[in-house]
Image (tube, helix red, strand yellow):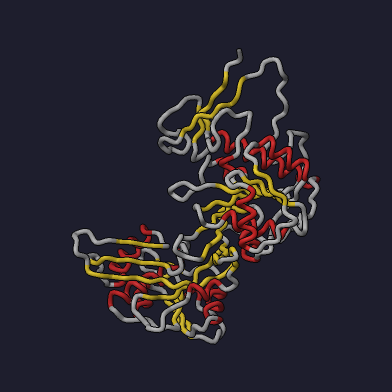
Amino acid sequence: MAKQKTAFVCVDCGSEHNKWQGQCQDCGAWNTLSELRLGPASANKATPARQGYAGSVAGEVQMLANVSIEALPRRSTGFEEFDRVLGGGLVPGSAILIGGHPGAGKSTLLLQVLCRLAAQCECLYATGEESLPQIAMRAKRLGLQADTLKLCAETSLELLLGQAAKIKPKVLVVDSIQVLHSDDVSSAPGSVSQVRECAAALTRFAKETGTVLLMVGHVTKDGGLAGPKVLEHIIDCSIMLEGSSDSRYRTLRGSKNRFGAVNELGVFAMTELGLKEVKNPSAIFLNRGDVVTSGSTVMVVWEGTRPLLVEIQALVDSSGFGNPRRVAVGLEQNRLAMLLAVLHRHGGLQVGDQDVFVNVVGGVKVLETGSDLALLFAIVSSFRDRPLPEDLVVFGEVGLSGEIRPVPSGQERLQEARKHGFRRAIVPHGNAPRSDLGMTVIGVKTLAEALEAI
């Protein structure tokens, strides 16, 4: 009887090892190796040519100039915010992975998209977590047109591919990849081997037939996509739907996109009729109170290909313990500690014995360094208990030596601020406009100059 081959695959980096060990030799992560059964060895049957993730068998070598390039028209999802994150729409033959916490609205968003696309082309919604009556009840509750969308409840990969080959859909949704299982893999659904083989087979089918593949992925308790890291390498686009349970707004952020810009942001609002796109995200994030308070600053961040105005708040209070607290919500906590040290060294403000709490209003996560100057202004405003002007907007990167570094797309940020009624701005000297924009712009070179300007 043929011996079954096994390998141990790292969940983080996807590298294979012959035997189990505590640490991965490639990425250095601990306790990330999972057993992968490769199937029994076949000595009598000829081994067929294994297809790659791109859906092509190894063939002859071609010159790059001789490769035929066909125009791939993008298909709109019906949501401008979703199309923005995808880079302009759905590309035929692309594999897209959508992740998010339970209850974020992944299934709701995809059901709304497919009900709109089903009126234009053949679509198939394959579910393995919900029954067909449950999906029908949701579509009726949301008021969706459900007479053209085809559904199937299937968890077997082979049966699902057979249904897709018969129907030949232009758009295929799999909800979710963690519940699919292949008969060729003996491990349980959701394991490393099952997720990898099922995703590879679905991606190969999408590439060969030109079908748009949308897969729903689970997330771990840390917020990352569940499954092997190779899953993110197989697909063409990785999107995360983020949003807390106590907020009605959801943000759709792209972390990988082979057909557009990464870190693009789309904003949706969860309503009784499903997800509604927010055309002007800056307006909802700038819903400030009537009373002007200290510790609040408006900054302009750059998300993907557009500027976004966000309010940042800070609270500085005397610490009752020997170790003051540093809490950052929506910002990186290590960068907060670094900026407080810069504020002490080059700004002459000592907050070492104070508790510092910072928060980005609206649940937005700010990843760029252009928010450094606005964060320090909010901290100084709270510490001195002096409110900043309501029509003031701030952005700029702060270096360790106290210099204010310019940020990309400074002109577009100022134009977005002026469009929302801001008349004063403190920006890096390198981002100061050369022409009049209809607002007072102060360019600063150091942190000391910036503090003197306010």
Q: Residue at x 43, y 38 (%)?
A: 29
Check the picture and name the quadrant holding the N terminus. top right
User: Residue 341 location in percent, x, y?
Assistant: 30, 64
Q: Residue at x 71, y 39 (%)?
A: 161
165 lies left or right of 448: right
Q: Quadrant of residue 412?
A: bottom right
Out of 294 and 139, give the one closest to the viewer. 139
User: Residue 371 location in percent, x, y?
Assistant: 44, 68
Q: Is residue 213 above or below residue 138?
A: above
Q: Residue at x 59, y 47 (%)?
A: 130
Q: Quadrant of residue 119?
A: bottom right
Q: Is residue 63 above or below residue 415?
A: above
Out of 92 and 132, give the one closest to the viewer. 132
Q: Is residue 288 above or below residue 438?
A: above
Furthest-top residue in view? 1
User: Residue 24 location in percent, x, y?
Assistant: 45, 34
Q: Is residue 301 above or below residue 229?
A: below
